[in-house]
Amino acid sequence: MSGRTRRAILAFVTAIGGQGLLTIAGFVATPLILRLTSESLYGYWILLLSVLAYLALTDLGLGTSFARMVAGLAGRDDPEALNRVISSAFFAYCVAAVLFVGLGDALAPFIPGWFHIPPAEVRQVETTYWVALVATALFLPLSTFAGVVIGFQRMAVANVTSNVIRAFSLALTVGLLRLGVGLPSLALAYLFSVVVDSVWLFVYARRCFPQLRVRPSLVNRSDIATLVSYGGYFQFGRIANTVAQNTDSIIISATMGVARVTPYAFTSRLPLFFSVSIAGKMPDAAFPGLSQMFAAGEYRQLGHVAISLTRYTVRLAVVAGVFLAVANEQFIALWVGPRYYAGARLNAVFVYLVVQETIIRGLTPVVLASGDLRKWAFVSMGEALINVAASLLMVGPLGLIGVALGTALGKASTTAWYLPYVICQKVKLRLSTFLYRAMLLPALRSVPGMVLAVAVATMLPRSLGWIWIFVVGLAAVVGNALFFEAPELFKRAGDGPQNRLRRMIALPTDRP
């Protein structure tokens, strides 16, 4: 197993473990936060995060561009060149932060009117908005150090520590709410996590790269141009992603009222957890290694990795889809109460979305690592435009379902078909081979596990509550593993258990 593969797998495992810790903390904290605020105030918090996500686009997509450049320089003995890139990124982020605060200040007077905030709650919401605005502005330049850690493929320790800090910030939120601070508690806890996590990442970045220096004199116009050139095209993809994840709540609030935002957000919580928080971990961990492989022209190996990543995400998509179909209603009812479940028809749309989005998440890092984003950028903008237009057209007659269908239509008509095509071009694979080996075969092999999960869900009484949720989820995961990993464990009887496990999980990035 190569160093690249080992680091990618370790980063993936720690990211999943850290995400698991954060999910448990959020799972426990969310009902408490909801009880200590109100349905409308929690809805306003979701809306404020959506507005801030749009404002954060002022960073021009520098993050991925910067991590890619660091990954390209990490293996070279040229600390001066690397410090130029780091300093250029840091001060470019500072400019973006100033622009971010300026736009946020310009929008602030309109927030109460846009979101129809009652006069009694305006002060709470405005205070929360400003604290969150400052926290996000600080995050922009401080995220430079996270980019250094990612570029050096040293994410394992950082993943665990960052998620522990975020979990602690949830506890801080609950504590502040109990002290009567109100809605600003959520923003103050967010500010705490940004500052503490950034300090830790700076310390760890210095361990990865002891010669690290950030100075205005090291800022290089050529490096900034490279960062912005790549980041500019990447930004189109970020816009599409921001629209997909943050526009729904704004449209719902404007057309149906803020009270409908909260049920929609809770019904979509598990879909987002699977398709964003989980599905992106393995591809994100592999991104620096993919960038290095594109730089070295290792197209044969890139083809193997693209197929492997897609197989993993197809399997996860099937497991997530079947679990959501049978268990999402029960999960929400047990977690925050049945009145926050927005209905079976909306859930069916989310099942489709989680399958589609999970697979797309597995494909996107291959395109990003290639560095050629021009066509992908325009396709992503097409996705964003179709998403907004379709959501606005369908929210009137279909309500919440229309908003979700707009998101599904935007992706299905653009990136869902484009990504497999362009990846095959970049890694020199036949499209038919990729679709058959990476998508069709793992989907077909996942069917028996899917049937097992549905059978278990049907036979067990729902009165078991959380035990029912756990057993159904376990059946979905184990059922899938029985038809994939289990056969590998029994192949080549002469091999020891360690070698069999290594064959089972390793990405094929080693040189032949």
Image (tube, helix red, strand yellow):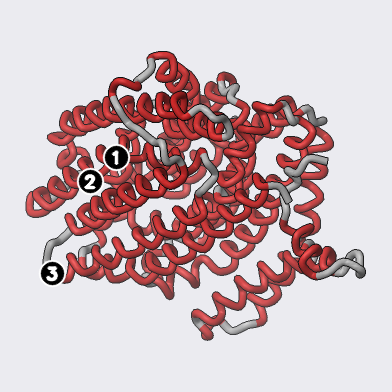
Q: Amino acid at mark 1?
A: Leu
Q: Is residue 390 left or right of residue 52?
A: right
Q: Residue under circle 3?
A: 179
Task: Label 3: state its secondary structure.
Answer: loop
Task: Label 2: state its secondary structure.
Answer: helix
Give the total number of marks visible in the rendering.
3
Q: Position of residue 399 (x, y in %)?
A: 41, 47
Q: Position of residue 6 (x, y in %)?
A: 65, 52
Query: Is 173 located above or below residue 416 in the figure?
Result: below
Q: Position of residue 319 (x, y in %)?
A: 65, 61
Residues at marks 1 and 3, CA–CA distance in whole angstroms: 26 Å
Q: Tell me which residue sits at (30%, 41%) in the image.
A: 139
- The answer to whether the residues at label 1 and label 3 have Cβ atoms under 8 Å apart is no
Q: Amino acid at mark 3?
A: Leu
Q: Residue under circle 2?
A: 132
For label 1, the crowd category at 10 Å Cα-Cα, with few meaning under 14, some 14 to 19 and many 20 or more, is some
Query: Is 366 located above or below residue 130 in the figure?
Result: above
Q: Residue under circle 1?
A: 52
Residues at marks 2 and 1, CA–CA distance in whole angstroms: 8 Å
Between disc 2 and disc 3, whose residue precedes? 2
Q: Tell me which residue sits at (72%, 42%) in the image.
A: 305
